[in-house]
Amino acid sequence: MDTPILGADGEGMPGAETVKNTTTQDFMRDVIEASNERPVLVDFWAPWCEPCKQLTPVLEKAVRATKGAVALVKMNIDDHPEVPGQMGVQSIPAVFAFKEGRPVDGFMGALPESQINAFIARLVGETVGTAADVETATAALEAGDVNAAAQIFGQIMQDEPENMEALAGLARCYVKTGDLDRAEQTLALAPPNQADSAPIAAAQSALDLARKSSDAGDVDTLRAKAAQSPDDPQAQFDLALALTASGDREGALDALLSIVAKNRSWNDDAARKQLVQFFEVWGPADPATTSGRQRLSSLLFA
């Protein structure tokens, strides 16, 4: 995993570094400050992580191909756990893209080279090709067309029963319609060796959040309670769950971030942990995730 520091042209020349390793102490300089000059990808990895060993060389190749337009910074989470903990990294490999000092996009898992190239192309504003079926179905689901998404995910599973992204997507469709038992049954179809994969884990988080939010209570009642007790973190926390269940993601962010700002350690860091679950469920490309990560980052790295 440790590779030589490369120059912007990929030939090891001195100057601006295209690929490098970083530490907790140098993260601000190598990532936050450096991303004001060009986009910086952060690759969170560990020596024991086999998917990391598959992903990192592909990342390095894709970044070098940009001829210095994008930088790659790698962080070993075993040696430097603080930053990934603050960023809400729960599984690796995890990649975050920073621009102008803030996280703007990201993904988890060892994606194929074509998807990594598309990710970097979006980052630097280049045109990318037609989206794959999974991406089309995901977009339909995010747009609220659950029936279309379910049909596409179901067709993919017929053609590729081992496709965990499609299986997870179908489970998310059931979560979206409130059929939580069916969602749980769908996730149970994942083979044991895929139960902890990124797509399945994210869908499981969506299911867990839906069950938790369904018990949160009435939004108006909780909003009134939170307004009467603005310094009560439990009131803000309960309101956040109710708001996300109603679809008000920004409102949910406001409630949880207010806890982080005032009393981050409350209930064993519960507000930050809940934010992390929100981000995982909403997905790295969701505007609420991007906004939430930026605001959380501002609080953590202020």
Image (spheres, grey):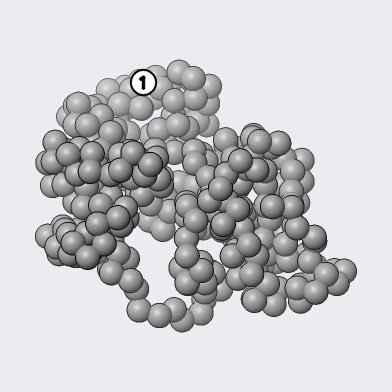
- Check disc 1: other Cα within 10 Å, few if <14, some if 14-19, many if 20+: some
Residue 135 percent across, percent down from the top left: 32, 66
Question: Amino acid under label 1?
Answer: Gln
276, 183: nearer the viewer: 183
Horizontal placement of 20 versus 233: left or right? right
Residue 193 percent across, percent down from the top left: 38, 41
Residue at the (28%, 33%) spot, across then down: 208
Residue 97 percent across, percent down from the top left: 56, 58
Local secondary structure at mark 1:
helix
139, 2: nearer the viewer: 2
Q: Is residue 207 above or below residue 162?
A: above
Residue at numbered disc 1 = 234
199, 25: nearer the viewer: 199
Horizontal placement of 75 versus 49: left or right? right
Task: Tell me which corner region of the image, top left, top right, bottom left or bottom right, holds residue 24.
Answer: top right
Residue at the (44%, 79%) spot, across then down: 128
In the picture as drawn, the residue positioned furthest to the right comes out as 14
**Looking at the image, can residue 286 be seen?**
yes
Q: Is residue 79 above or below residue 144?
A: above
Q: Is residue 181 above or below residue 199?
A: above
Residue at the (25%, 52%) spot, across then down: 167
**Looking at the image, can residue 98 be seen?**
no
Residue at the (27%, 23%) spot, across then down: 225
Task: Tell me which corner region of the image, top left, top right, bottom left or bottom right, holds residue 248.
Answer: top left
Q: Quadrant of the C terminus?
A: top right
Q: Is residue 220 above or below residue 127?
A: above
159, 84: nearer the viewer: 159
Residue 217 percent across, percent down from the top left: 19, 27
